[in-house]
Amino acid sequence: MNNFRTISSAFGIALTGWPLIILFTNGIKGSYEFSLLTNSLTLMAHVPFWVGFEFFARKYLDAPSTNGEAKLSVLTVLFGLPLFIGTYCVNAQLLTFQAEKSFTLPFSNQALYLLTLSAVLELALGFLVVVCFISIFESIEHTHRIRKLASYALWSVASLFLCFCAIKSLSAQYSQPGDCEEMTKYWLVMFIQFGIVQLSLLWVPAVLFSHNSYLNEDTPPALKRLGALYMLAYFPFNLYWCHAGLGHFYDIFLMCGKDDIKLMFSFIYYGWSIVPGCIVCLCLVLGITGYLIFIVLKKLFPEHFVNVHYEPMEAENDGSSLGLDQPLNIKLEAQEFDADNNSYKYSKEEVCSICLEEFQQKQQIAPWKPCQHLFHYECIQNWAQRRRNCPICKRNYQL
């Protein structure tokens, strides 16, 4: 594992730090070069963060301590959030230089590389911080309500920041009329459609953290439709709109630029919304390319692609392959949960492992035979319609 960390760290530092070699070779002569330097150093700081996260994840999650996950979440938010904000600010400063001077600046390729890499790393870090933030709330109370409360708190912070960006962008006083008014129209259209999208996402926490989502192993259909809508409608339009914004910046920012770095806060925040679509398209292109290469190689060298046939193995009769149209004959005995009653020989659980909700006094529960693991009666009843084995230890139910 130490070798893996060493190799990963070396690769990450090389990936994020190679612009430094070119900078030091040519010399740091001004604020633009210094901005490139701070951007590259900030990205390099992501490497020890992720290595440290992997180390503490193994340390805390593998330990018998029950609060290991909470400690990991607190450390991640404590160090990850400042790194996220710092990277965001240096990205805005670097993009401001690029927008003001267009591609006449030196090191433009390095700047474009650093900004692209920053977008990917920031999305990954932001997602991790959000998950750990919700996990901190879960350590206080294991309920769907607390998860939704944490999600709405994060949504409110993002909405306030969006309002701040909108006010700063739309109230910017430009030095020249005419073309500068086009910038105001651009920001107005962008914030209207981006605000509608953010409002429409209000229902996502309710769907994601609903009781049924824990009972159902599949992705909720509503989220699948949301993903399809994003790729088919939102991503193509906003990819064009983001490119149009870059055109505005390069054409008239030198003449119209006022309070530029706050405008770049808005543009980066908006640009992040198309990064997932770009990643999906890149993976799709690489997948199609790889498949075409495979077909060509298979035609050229058929002897290296011999099909191997295996005899089908008899499936274990644990009920895992049965559909809902073949219900299992499993009878569960409902009981009232009593935390002080130890007359039943079952392993006491903090939460139901199916829905992750805590057990409440006088709540309907049911033990699983023969392991006696405890679950909510409704949860295990739905489980027993499709599975014959225990959700925790996988032991088959004894009829």
Image: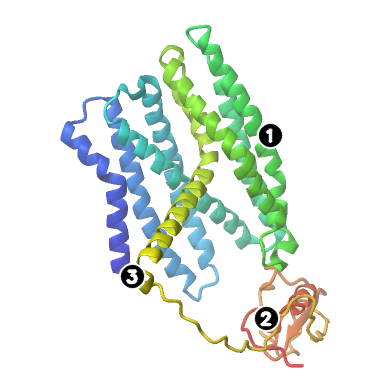
Question: In x, y percent, where is residue 128?
Answer: 51, 53
Q: Is residue 337 visible?
A: no
Mark 3 residue type? Met
Q: Is residue 370 left or right of residue 306?
A: right
Q: Earlier in the sequence, mark 2 or mark 3?
A: 3
In this rendering, the label closer to the viewer, 1 or 2: 2
According to the picture, the residue beneath numbered tag 3 turns out to be 1
> Which SS class for mark 3?
loop
In the image, what residue occupies the spot 67% across and 53% down?
Answer: 223
> Which SS class for mark 2?
loop
Determine the CA span between mark 3 and mark 1: 46 Å
Q: Is residue 306 visible?
A: yes
According to the picture, the residue beneath numbered tag 1 turns out to be 196
User: Where the C terminus falls, by quadrant?
Assistant: bottom right
Question: In x, y percent, where is residue 201?
Answer: 68, 43
Question: In x, y percent, where is residue 4?
Answer: 32, 66
